[in-house]
Image (tube, rainbow, N blue to C red):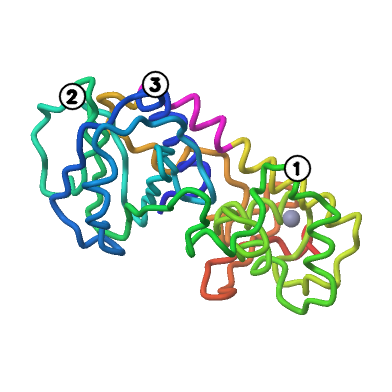
Amino acid sequence: MPELPEVETSCRGIRPHLDGQIISRLEVRQRKLRWPVPELLNELLPDNRITAVTRRGKYILLKVQGGSVMIHLGMSGCLRVLPQATPAGKHDHVDLILANGQMLRLTDPRRFGSVLWQPEGEIHALLADLGPEPLSEAFDAAYLHRRCEGRKTAIKQLIMDSKVVVGVGNIYANEALFLAGISPKRPAGNISGRRLETLTATIKQVLQDAIEQGGTTLRDFSGSDGKPGYFKQQLNVYGRGGKPCVRCLEPLVEVRLGQRSTVFCRFCQR
Ligand code: ZN
């Protein structure tokens, strides 16, 4: 599933091809994605200019006059910028046709992705309850401390809650907790401010590293396969249950926490 770094990389990849371009029309071959693609888009988008390409959580936002097109990649979606003549495959559900001969194509075999509309001046219900962006200044130690105070929830589940902070997926939660030396099972309210400060930093670090890694593998979204996929990042714990801890060489423990695979070192993480 594309995580925040992959979505950020997709966003950066398509931006130079879309920013400032005029939309000719929207071609929808399959309207039934996770939510139906609003028919209204066929009226709103023609002759409209894209003035910004941004990201909020795992949504890519294409700002146009009157609002923003919100694109989510779901479980298996990818975006490519292609010449309009490129034949559509079975899973190429939506094309945003540009006046310059190019198009943005959403390919999504599992159809958990979405293309939605956020009118200007409103916040879409799916974005309304989101916590701060992890790489923004709003997400700092003082903020995390406030959100942890009095909470018995395991810290791993708390940092994966998008109402607390967006985009900390399972891989990155595992890795950030290892780097911070904090047990994923520890109740959030039972962690000192100093250790939460470290955790805030390691969350930013693992995400930033993944984005940079994506940036280096990313050449040009135009004509590429459009699949940044999982970045071949050096992972210390995720997917390494039973293998030796990179620090103390003791076997890493793997448990389920909130139904998600959780790997940690009993000795290095308290
Ligand atoms: Zn260890």
* Residue position for label 3: 219
Q: Is residue 212 magenta?
A: yes
Expressed as whole percent of the image width and height from the top left, the position of residue 213 reads 53, 31
Q: Amino acid at mark 1?
A: Glu
| Labels 2 & 3 near each other (Cβ < 8 A) | no
Give me the C-alpha separation between circle 1 and circle 3. Answer: 29 Å
* Residue position for label 1: 137
| Above-or-below relation of 27 to 48 | below
Q: Quadrant of residue 195?
A: bottom right
Magenta region, main secondary structure: helix
Tell me which numbered mark, 1 or 3, is placed earlier along the sequence. Answer: 1
Residue at (33% x, 55% y) in the render: 114
Q: How many numbered marks are there?
A: 3
Label 1 sits on a secondary structure element that is: loop
| Above-or-below relation of 94 to 25 | below
Left or right of 187 in this view: 44: left
Expressed as whole percent of the image width and height from the top left, the position of residue 192 reads 90, 63
Q: Dividing the image into four quarters, tell me where ligand 1 lies.
A: bottom right
Q: Amino acid at mark 2?
A: Pro
Q: Quadrant of residue 137?
A: top right
Check disc 3: other Cα within 10 Å, few if <14, some if 14-19, many if 20+. Answer: few
Tell me which numbered mark, 2 or 3, is placed earlier along the sequence. Answer: 2
The residue lying toward the viewer, choosing from 173 and 243, is 173
Residue at (21% x, 42% y) in the render: 26
Give me the C-alpha separation between circle 2 and circle 3. Answer: 17 Å
* Residue position for label 2: 83
Q: Amino acid at mark 3?
A: Arg
Q: Quadrant of residue 170?
A: bottom right
Ligand 1 within 8 angstroms of badge 2 C-beta: no
The span shown in magenta is: 210-220
